[in-house]
Image (cartoon, rainbow, N blue to C red):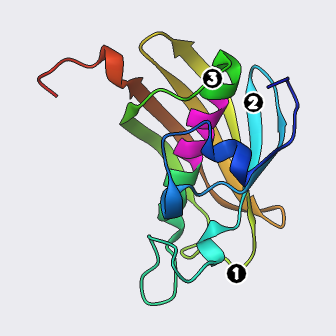
Amino acid sequence: MKFGQVLNRTDIRGLIPQTGAMCLLSGVSAWDETRLIAQSDRHLQPDYPLRVEGRVRTVCALESAAQAMALHGALCAGGTAQSGYLASVRGVNLHQPWLPDAPMQIQVNAVWTDQQGFTDTFAITCDEQPLISGKITIFLSNTVGDNV
């Protein structure tokens, strides 16, 4: 994939490990070596796996941010995302209790990347209104010991 190339859901499914209903990203509108901007409308579907009694808590959007990070890593590496473990979520700001009934925009920005994993900041918005933001660190599976 080339820097900046627009991606759709089919493209994304070939690059991240999440499949079926758990593939939460619907598209990518921009990306380069330091950031990625994705869209998600999956939470609007009745079969969204994190929906409870017809609604989705905003904190569930952390999974969309983590998938955007994995996708960004895969695009920058020129292939499929490696499996990883969520190591930490820090500095989270929840601006709304529930996800709106509209598509979301997810932006991730690389802070630290090496062979062991990566840390990104993220911000998720809807119609330019903030929903949730923070920082996520993921350790790659091939670097985590057998005792985890």
Can you identify the residue that label 1 sits on? Answer: 101
Task: Name the disc covering residue 79, or none.
Answer: 3
Locate the C terminus and report the quarter of the image it occupies: top left
What's the residue at 75%, 68% (across, down)? 103
Can you identify the residue that label 2 sits on? Answer: 35
User: Is residue 146 rendered to the left or right of residue 20?
Assistant: left
Residue 114, relative to residue 128: is it above or below?
A: above
Give the image quarter of residue 36: top right
x and y percent of residue 40 in the render?
69, 60
Give the image quarter of residue 30: top right
Amino acid type, residue under disc 3 in the picture:
Gly
Q: What secondary structure predominates along the stretch shown in magenta?
A: helix
The secondary structure type at the circle numbered 1 is: loop
For this rendering, which residue is in front, 93 or 20? 20
What's the residue at 75%, 75% (across, down)? 102
Residue 12, relative to residue 143: is it above or below?
A: below
Give the mark, 3 or 1, whose residue is nearer the N terminus.
3
- Give how far apart the Cα atoms at labels 1 and 2 are: 26 Å
Give the mark, 3 or 2, whose residue is nearer the N terminus.
2
Amino acid type, residue under disc 1 in the picture:
Asp
Amino acid type, residue under disc 2 in the picture:
Arg
> Circle 3: is it few (<14), some (14-19), or many (20+) Cα within 10 Å?
some
x and y percent of residue 25 in the render?
65, 54
For the record, the magenta segment spans 65-72
> Circle 2: is it few (<14), some (14-19), or many (20+) Cα within 10 Å?
many
